[in-house]
Image (cartoon, helix red, strand yellow):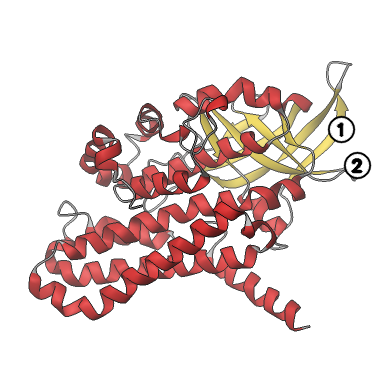
Amino acid sequence: MKPQPLTTTAPELATWLDANAEAIDTAQDLAREILPRLGRADLFQIGVPAHEGGLDGTAVDAIEAIAGVAAHSLTAAFVFWGQRTFIEYLLQSPNEALRARWLPALLRGELAGATGLSNAMKYLSNIEPLQMNATPRLIDGAGAGWTLNGKLPWITNLRREGFLAAAAFDHSDGAPPSIFAIPHDAAGVVRSDDLDLIALRSSNTAALTVERTALDASWQITADAPAFLARVRPAFLGFQCGLSIGLARRALAAIDESSAPARAAVADEVAPLAHELDALTKRLFDGVQHGTFVSAPAALFEVRIGLAAAVDRAVRLEVVTAGGRGYLREKGGTARRTREAAFVPIVTPSIVQLKNQLAQHQRTRAA
């Protein structure tokens, strides 16, 4: 079934994003508005069970929703990805009290959920060690807890108005790494100024430092980070792939809206690219829907790499067909989409990291 565009499912949001996409990408003035607007459109509830306050559906439906937003603004879709991924962590967490306490506000977009697990996903793939540490302690003389320390240099959706950030911690006592939800107002939690990005500037992207922060088990998403990360990685990367799908679709649509001579000049390249995009999207949806990516992450890495390449080709073809008009910032969004496309290969895990992982996987299989 062909996905419904955002102009149909959430026309008010689509109009606002189209009118402000350039400002959202290049400035920070509208950063506080994105999350509540996505929440009012009920987008965070897609793929969430009704008994948890959602609209039912599947993770595939959530990917399509992220893609729908990305067709209008990659910055807004990046915020959407961070929020929906954090929601997924709570849905898959055994900590029912944590989920019951915070999920309603997250689904409404009243509280930001920041997925600070990029470092942890790289740890899972043996790319880098964990950057956060937890030391056991007694809190107020009674009840087990931990003292948390560390810094994560890049987290999206650290909304100044309030956030929970997921982060994985190594344990000094030799216990398995675990994952905590870190509240913005806990003692020792410091958010940096927004990073000086070349684009996506309204995404509330900053560094997070945790220094001698005391949290107890009520804030623990999972006590077994490796197993949990392997289970949620298909959603983490699958939702992320929605960024590529939406941006590539929009670039192809822009080509289709160009002049007849321009379309004819690239027709031999556009047709196979559109077919490839559809095939990669189907592979992604099938793997997420049937759970095959949990035990076969290399297949998911291949899809992510393929989609990044498709985005690059689609936007380059859009530049060709737009001509000089595309070089104007306020004319059709071509210039903005070239900046957005430049982000796709570097979002963690980056294409370089994934290609290295695939090469390692192939060497292991050969051995």
Disc 2 and disc 1 in contact, CB within 8 angstroms: yes
Tag 1: residue type? Pro
**In the rendered structure, which disc, 2 or 1, sits on the residue that comes first in sequence?**
1
Q: CA distance from mark 2 to mark 1?
A: 7 Å
Residue 33, located in which quarter of the rendered image? top left
Classify mark 2: residues with Cα within 10 Å, few (<14), some (14-19) or many (20+).
few
Can you give x and y, in whole percent of width and height, for residue 310 in the image?
38, 69
Classify mark 1: residues with Cα within 10 Å, few (<14), some (14-19) or many (20+).
some
Q: Which mark is residue 28?
A: none
Question: To which residue does mark 1 refer?
Answer: 136
Q: Residue furthest left?
A: 260
Question: To which residue does mark 2 refer?
Answer: 173
User: Which of these two is toward me, 277 or 108?
Assistant: 277
User: Which of these two is toward me, 51 or 111?
Assistant: 51
Residue 115, located in which quarter of the rendered image? top right
Can you give x and y, in whole percent of width and height, for residue 149 in the image?
74, 38
User: Which of these two is toward me, 296 or 320?
Assistant: 296
Q: Is residue 44 left or right of residue 325?
A: right
Residue 238 higher or lower than 150, as above or below: below
Q: Is residue 360 left or right of residue 200?
A: right
User: Which of these two is toward me, 190 or 32?
Assistant: 32
Q: Is residue 208 left or right of residue 16?
A: right
**Residue at the image point whose x is 56% and y is 54% from the top:** 288
Report whether residue 201 is seen.
no
**Residue at the image point whose x is 20% and y is 65% from the top:** 255
**Residue at the image point whose x is 58% and y is 72% from the top:** 355
Tag 2: residue type? Asp
